[in-house]
Image (cartoon, helix red, strand yellow):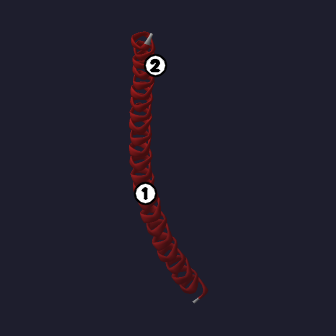
């Protein structure tokens, strides 16, 4: 009777160990997915920053061009009035 009970306990322990192993594997897989997602977010953030810097440079160029054009128009109008 004792041997049967111990055999049953070993079977339960084996099932529990297998379940723990599966849970650890599932957790590791989940961590890998999270890591991959964070890497994608990081890459997208770098691309967005690069795009923002390009837009900022373009807007500065436009601002400088508008200032130059305004100055040229004012000078032209001054010559016309004179």
Q: Which mark is residue 12?
A: 2
Query: Where is residue 56 drawn, in percent x and y?
Result: 46, 64
Q: Nearer the viewer, residue 42 or 8?
A: 8
Query: Where is residue 35 drawn, in percent x and y?
Result: 39, 42
Query: Where is residue 41 drawn, in percent x and y?
Result: 45, 46
Reply above or below: 80 against 40: below
Mark 1 and mark 2: Cα distance apart in space: 55 Å
Q: Nearer the viewer, residue 59 or 74?
A: 59
Name the quadrant of the N terminus.
Answer: top left
Q: Nearer the viewer, residue 26 or 32?
A: 26
- The residue that appears at 41% across and 38% down in the rendered structure is 31
Contact flag, marks 1 and 2 (Cβ < 8 Å): no
- Based on the displayed image, in which of its 4 quarters is residue 80 positioned? bottom right
- Within 10 angstroms of label 2, few (less than 14), some, or many (20 or more) residues? few
- The residue that appears at 39% across and 29% down in the rendered structure is 25
- The residue that appears at 57% across and 89% down in the rendered structure is 82
Q: Work out whether mark 1 precedes mark 2 in sequence or the reverse, and give the earlier one.
A: 2
Callout 1 secondary element: helix
As drawn, which residue projects farthest toward the front?
A: 1
Callout 2 secondary element: helix
Q: Which residue is mark 1?
A: 49
Q: Which mark is residue 74?
A: none
As drawn, which residue projects farthest toward the right?
A: 81
Q: Nearer the viewer, residue 59 or 50?
A: 50
Query: Where is residue 71 drawn, in percent x and y?
Result: 51, 80
């Amino acid at each position: 009777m004792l041997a049967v009970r111990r055999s049953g306990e070993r079977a339960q322990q084996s099932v529990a160990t297998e379940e723990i192993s599966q849970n650890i594997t599932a957790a590791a897989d989940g961590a890998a997915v999270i890591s991959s997602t964070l890497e994608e977010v990081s890459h997208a953030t770098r691309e967005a920053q690069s795009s923002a810097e390009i837009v900022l440079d373009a807007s500065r160029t436009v601002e400088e061009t508008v200032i130059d054009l305004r100055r040229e128009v004012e000078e032209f109008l001054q010559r016309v009035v004179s």
